[in-house]
Image (tube, rainbow, N blue to C red):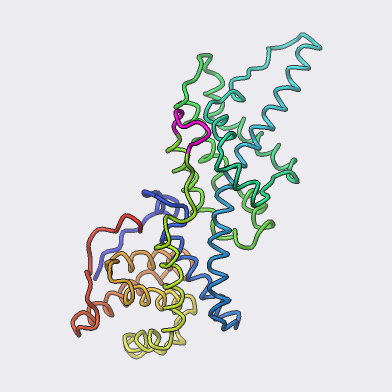
Amino acid sequence: MLQITTFAPFYRYIVLFYTMINRELIRLKAVQVSYSFYVGGRYNLEAAEKELFLSLSKSYDLYNYLLLLMIEVNRIAERTYDTAVSRYQRLNEGEEPNPKFIQNKFLAQLEANNQLHEVVENQKLTWADDEDFLRRLYRQVTECEPYKEYMANPADSTYQEDRELWRQIYRQVFVDNEELDSLLEEKGIYWNDDRFIIDTFILKTLNRFEQKNGSRQPLLPEFKDEEDREFARKLLRSSLLGAETYRTTITQFLRGWELDRLAIMDVIILQTALAEIMNFPNIPVSVSINEYVNIAKMYSTPQSGRYINGLLDNIARQFMADGRLHKSMGGKEEKQE
């Protein structure tokens, strides 16, 4: 049986990303849309496909929305600084306010980013109605250790130090922030399950910023190319159109169990995994199994990952022995995966 390495959910997704909508996210969305297709009783393939691409597009909006959030927090910092300076000048007491944080070179570059400006304008992304939340979030920023250490150092900071500060702030303040999670849930139904993945996209983006690129610093594109769009379309269609065949196969390998004894999410994960294994010859079987086992660990029962791993492994090996499957069982994951 294949040995599946277990990762913590957050670390699981810190890998080389070349696009925002990568294939891990596509797989996850295909499973989610398929679940809605069956549970919601909306048996319309065209509608399911539209739902898939809408959901992926909304994930890209969330990516840009969270980048914008850093800019909005910095604007709160600027207003707070201006108020403190005015008070200092009027009363002439205490220490003169330190402008180091609002002069952060990385954040100034992010605020000037051409690509982000375009997306924010086109999608009408805004935090304008969340002033109170922004102030509370800024207060959390000022209370975290990276901020305190940064402001306590009287020396001028380098661009790399400025960028690292915001990377640490994002990790410690923005990630796993319950209030932010609740707010995003109120704003969009498509964002409920995306945060833990999108956070890793944000951190990868911050790591790639270079001062020399200025406002032309590239952000992650939505799709790398048409091939990834086609992967999403073909995966969903193959899973739904071949459902009867895949479910018959699953039943044959359950060894006396009936299919209805499995959780519906497990059936859909298995069905989507088999659609990928059977229809994408360039993706090694081990890659597909790993991806869907991890989806099972996140979205189904604690036991699901183990038996989905074993079931898919047995099916694939039997199909290869029968000559029904001609592809690699193992091998390194392709770059785009």
Left or right: residue 167 versus residue 101 is: left
Provide residue 184's location: percent of width, then percent of height. 64, 53
Front-most of residues 214 and 130: 214
- The N terminus lies in which quarter of the figure? bottom left
Quadrant the C terminus occupies: bottom left
Indicate the quadrant where residue 333 lies.
bottom left
Is residue 71 part of the magenta span, yes or no?
no
The residue lying at 59 percent from left, 24 percent from top is: 101
Whether residue 316 sits left or right of residue 228 in the image: it is: left
Q: Does residue 141 sit above or below 265 in this rendering?
A: above
Please tell me whether residue 310 is drawn above or below residue 249 in the rendered image: above
Number of numbered discs visible in the structure rendering? 0
Query: Residue 282 occupies which quadrant of the picture?
Result: bottom left
Residue at figure coordinates x 60%, y 81% from the top left: 42
Residue 181 spot, x, y in % from top left = 62, 52
Give coordinates of residue 239: x percent, y percent: 43, 78
What residue appears at the point 57 percent right and 40 percent down from the top-left corner? 173
Query: Residue extending furthest top?
Result: 92
Magenta stretch secondary structure, dominant: helix
Q: Quadrant of residue 315?
A: bottom left
312 left or right of 69? Answer: left
Q: Residue at x 64, y 50 (%)?
A: 122
Residue 212, magenta (yes or no): yes
Instruction: Give the x, y percent position of residue 70.
Output: 60, 38
Image: magenta residue range: 210-217
Whether residue 298 sits left or right of residue 79 in the image: it is left
